[in-house]
Amino acid sequence: MPHIKGLNAIRAFSIMLVVLNHMDAFQSILIPGVIDLRLAPMISGNFGVQVFFVLSGFLISHILLDERTRTGKINLKYFFIRRFLRLAPPLLIFFLLIGIALSQGYLSHTTDSLLYAAFYLYNFTPRELYASEMGHFWSLGVEEQFYLFWPLTLTTIKKVNSLIFFLCVLIFLCSVLVLIIHWIPLNKAYHISRWFIPACCPILIGCLGAVLNHYREHSVQQLLRHHWLVALLMLITYSFSLYAPVFMIPLGISIQSVAVILFILKLYHSQDRRWVRALEFAPLSYMGIISYGIYVYQGFFLRTGSGSELWFQQFPTNILLTLTLAVLSYELFEKQVLKLKRKFK
């Protein structure tokens, strides 16, 4: 797939939100009460993950729809091999770190918790089994479940209108579920908000954006030409938590994702613009390139907040180890493995 300028900058922005939140960088401004309730959804690590989700849904759909248009089908075998080659290298290093930490008595995770993570099911882990070092695996689980679900959906639903309707129905169901989660008894034992439904909602919005861009490109371009309207829509949807009734703030998982996909579509159709080229700023772009490794390793070193007494989880050692390992992992290991992906296009 041709390089899309600016996407690595989005990845960099997302991972910075995650890392800063896990370092408790925003604690001083998120005063309990109105500010943390209204402002947190706009700068939280969860919003960083949400951006990753929308981008993932858009890119994977863009690649698969292009393949289906060119060849008339989707090669599922090659798709799963490409995903494995992309995801596996940092995970192998991560579990090696967990194994070493366990053997030295630094950690005491249960076998069940490790199995949930290894099989991409951490988003279904009971609350009592949650481990701080692997808490971030909930999002990796949602992503992997999406990789199984979406290609099969595209090979089954051929008609464009049916595909759009299907996505809209799922997005609606996810949105309804997030509003009633607190009334579901199971939520006391599980993080239901992290189950595939409704957590995949931002990914589905990214998919919908890609489907519309692929099959209704002229209409999308017509909308994007109204620069002020698009900017206003992005502002209104991104700042949803600032003005929404309190009981509707959880809907931000859907509403804010609209702002993200609008920005991605605007960027996609503005590749020759100066502001997009500026997003290719080398350090920012490189952070986006290694963002997956940063996300995987920060779970081990930063956990999901401060409080650890272990030396490798103390600031600034934890952030230095995260960044160093992400760079070494990418340059010495991931790059070599990623070259194999070319054989499975």
Image: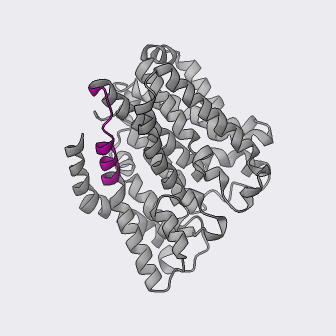
The chief SS type of the magenta part is: helix
Q: Position of residue 179 (x, y in %)?
A: 74, 42
- Identify whether 3 is placed above or below 314: above
Left or right: 116 with respect to 9?
A: right
Identify the image quadrant of the C terminus: top left
- Choose between 25 and 132: the one closer to the eye: 132
User: From this viewpoint, which residue is outermost toward the bottom?
Assistant: 104
The residue that appears at 51% across and 75% down in the rendered structure is 111
- Choose between 163 and 292: the one closer to the eye: 163
Q: Position of residue 330 (x, y in %)?
A: 30, 58
Determine if the magenta segment contains residue 191.
no
The quadrant holding residue 11 is top left
Left or right: 299 with respect to 254?
A: left
Identify the image quadrant of the N terminus: top left
User: From this viewpoint, which residue is outermost toward the front?
Assistant: 156
The quadrant holding residue 297 is bottom left
- Identify whether 83 is placed above or below 107: above
Is residue 171 visible from the viewing direction of this image? yes
Q: Position of residue 7 (x, y in %)?
A: 40, 38
**What range of the chain is rendered magenta?**
71-85
Determine if the magenta segment contains residue 75.
yes
Q: Position of residue 70 (x, y in %)?
A: 28, 25
User: Could you tell me how many numbered marks the image carries?
Assistant: 0
